[in-house]
Image (tube, rainbow, N blue to C red):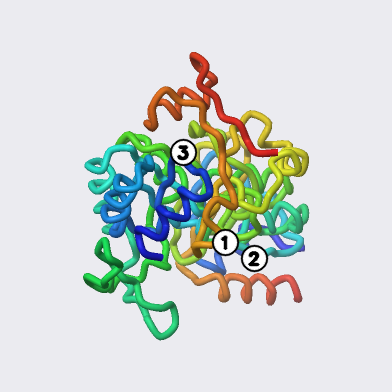
Amino acid sequence: MSPSSVMQTAKNKGLDLIAITDHNSMANCGVYAKAARDYKLDFWYGVEVQTAEEIHVLALFDDPEPALEFDKELYNSLLPIENDPEFFGDQVVIDSKANIVRFEKRALINSSIWTFDEAIKKIQSVGGFAFPAHVDAQTYSVIAQLGFIPTNISLPAVGISAKAKPQMVRQNFPQLKNYNLIQNSDAHYLKDIGSGYTDFYLEKPTVAELKMACKNEKGRKIKNKN
Amino acid sequence: MILLKDFLEKIDGKVLTTEVDISQTEIKDGYVSDLLSDVMGNAEEGQVWITIMRHLNVVAVASLANLSAVVFAKSYQPEDAVIKKANQEGICLISTPLPTFQVAGILYEMLKK
């Protein structure tokens, strides 16, 4: 998915803000951020961290600098196993025209050595917004792996999968009562962009504002699609 | 039914929760899983749970299912906060250098006798 085709599709779908959240790497965020600027879309650096317990946690940053610092730390926390391109496909880093700049050798399919709690705390400590991804899914979800959502760490929101109906998720998972739900597309293909979305009512597109929205502060709020 | 302390000897197990009295604890059966939702749904009272999962939720799940003990294989050790919680809940945590397969095999043999 070339940066410009992603932005064009997002624009067509009526999205205002998107994040790129590759598996365990932010290596491609920079070129997508630039493309987003060209298309006048708000953009957040993101990554889907796979924790030691094989839980997917999403990290969002509005500021590239701490994002890329975090990305370095994350990279060093990944198990030092080489990718097998025959099996998992090539892991490419691209430029703005989708030309391949380099191949990432370390297997990004693997887990970080960080536990769920450690990953969440780490993301939060560097100013990112952390939330467990697709908690309604049967794989790589915090509820599947840990039985329930740990209450010893502060989590303002949890993610739900694109195909889910937020009302049904609330019915099926009563333990989510006190959590905001963030629905996103988790798009792996152009056609999936916009298949899941969430309305954020914010003054400006920052993580600080999103945190306020999670607490319904000063008119900020989060609204799920029906 | 066997005694937990006899099993401990066979697997070179080290009790991490020193405040939990296990002198009379009995083992009825074993359960092997690293997926907590699976343990919650399927483990039964009196079983020893063998795992490499070390999250704090392990203690809550073990307590919920009334398990006899949790054995961390391959020398896996949970954080101090987990051990502290287990002491409070009266859940015995054990660490063994043996891999899961061997721990389960030894328990199976002991229970069969």
Q: Are marks 3 and 2 in contact (CB under 8 Å)?
A: no
Q: Say which quadrant the N terminus of chain B sits in.
A: bottom right
Q: At label 1, which amino acid type do we have?
A: Thr
Q: Earlier in the sequence, mark 3 or mark 2?
A: 2
Q: Residue furthest top?
A: A218
Residue A80 picture quarter: bottom left
Query: Which label belongs to residue B51?
Result: 1
Whole-percent x, y for residue A88 in the image? 43, 77
Q: Which comes before the other along the chain, label 3 or label 1?
A: 1
Mark 3 — residue? B81
Q: Residues within 10 Å of mark 2 (few under 14, many from 20)?
A: some
Taking the image as drawn, is residue A85 in sight?
yes
B52 lies left or right of A69: right
Towards the viewer: B8 or A144: A144
Q: Nearer the viewer, residue B57 or A52?
A: A52
Q: Is residue B47 left or right of residue A110?
A: right
- Mark 1 falls within which chain? B
Neighbours of disc 1 within 10 Å: few (<14), some (14-19), many (20+): many
Residue B32 badge: 2
In which quadrant is the C terminus of chain B drawn?
bottom right
Task: Label 3: state its secondary structure.
Answer: helix
Q: Amino acid at mark 3?
A: Ala
- Labels 3 and 2 in the same subunit: yes
Task: Write the residue at 50% across / 54% down.
Answer: A56
* Snapshot quadrant of residue A66: top left
Q: Are marks 1 and 2 in contact (CB under 8 Å)?
A: yes
Mark 3 to mark 1: distance in Å? 18 Å
